[in-house]
Image: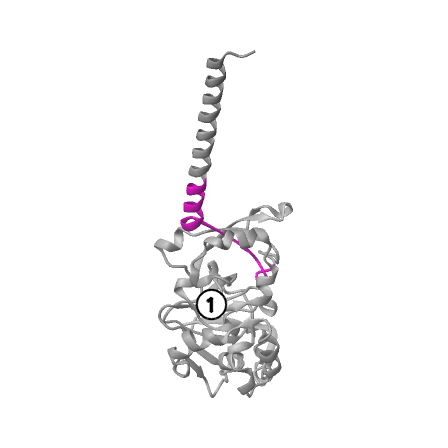
Amino acid sequence: MKAPDEEKKKQSRLTRELSEWGKALLYALIFGTIIRLFVFETMMVPTGSMIPSIEPGDRLFVEKVTYQFDNPDYGDIVVFWVPFKDLSAMEMLGPFDRFMDLLSPSEFRGHVKYVKRLVGMPGDVIELEVAPEYEDIASDILLLPVDEQPRYRLLVNGTVPDGFEELRYSRVGIFADPEFFFGLAYPDRAVSVYRNFFIEYSRYIEYREFYDKELAPLGLNELINVDTATKSVKLIIPEGFYFFMGDNTRNSFDSRFFGFVPERNIIGSPMLRIWPFSRFGPSL
């Protein structure tokens, strides 16, 4: 039979150990929360817009520190909060994704994250030009109301940015219809080749609030200009906003379709792919 003093000492040691473990768990929780808020973010990639660099379903660690002190640059692959609710992408989130988003700013609750390449910064004028290899059929393809083939190169302020020389894009969305953003917000009032697209997408995204609160007040008529000679659409990026497009141009729901992204929505840059394990490693 154990002596009373020995039993008390044993209980005291157990109490101290439990207390130390409790403190360690509390410190870990506090430290982990700080890291989650200010250093890293996680995201699940909902689409194939950045194939082959990033695949649908990839889960990424996103580094947040750099863009707290510096602005993203042309060609940077950036993770940002979608400025409207994408209901179809939200349904793809698993328990892990939803748990990690619990600490998200209240403004973005119910929103998902996209990852795209930055192509336009505040004050830029951007347009799509028929790529040199298609110049012999330029007059024909420019007559098409929409051209989903990747036959165009990006011009920013009249020149192709460094690193974009080989990238090709489809002339779709706002580059095909200057009223595209309005039509996406008000499909029942749209007169456009995209009317069926607008009606279909209204089932999957809640876009009208973003259009009314963020885009319409910018004065889109002054920012979206059509060249009567070439039929090309030129966009002026307003202050406080950015323009993103996906590399997989035929399968990318990007700024060509939903418009300018507010600067406050930018999160950071993808650093590490954590899932699936077979592709674990740097995300780019």
Q: Decide if residue 74 is in sight here.
A: no
As rendered, which of 2 and 260 lies closer to the eye? 2
- Residue at image position (46%, 17%) is 9
**Where is residue 157 shown, x and y percent of the image?**
40, 72
**Where is residue 67 shown, x and y percent of the image?**
39, 55
Q: Is residue 43 magenta?
A: yes
Q: Residues within 10 Å of mark 1 (few under 14, many from 20)?
A: many
As rendered, which of 142 and 38 lies closer to the eye? 38
Residue 48 relative to residue 121: left or right: right
Magenta extent: 29-51
Q: Is residue 7 above or below residue 88?
A: above
Residue 157 relative to residue 149: left or right: left
Q: Is residue 179 above or below residue 98?
A: below
As rendered, which of 13 and 78 lies closer to the eye? 13
Task: Give the quarter of the image for residue 248.
Answer: bottom right
Badge 1 amino acid: Pro
Residue 220 relative to residue 48: left or right: left
- Residue at image position (41%, 83%) is 221
Q: How many marks?
A: 1
Q: Which residue is mark 1?
A: 83
Q: Secondary structure at mark 1?
A: loop
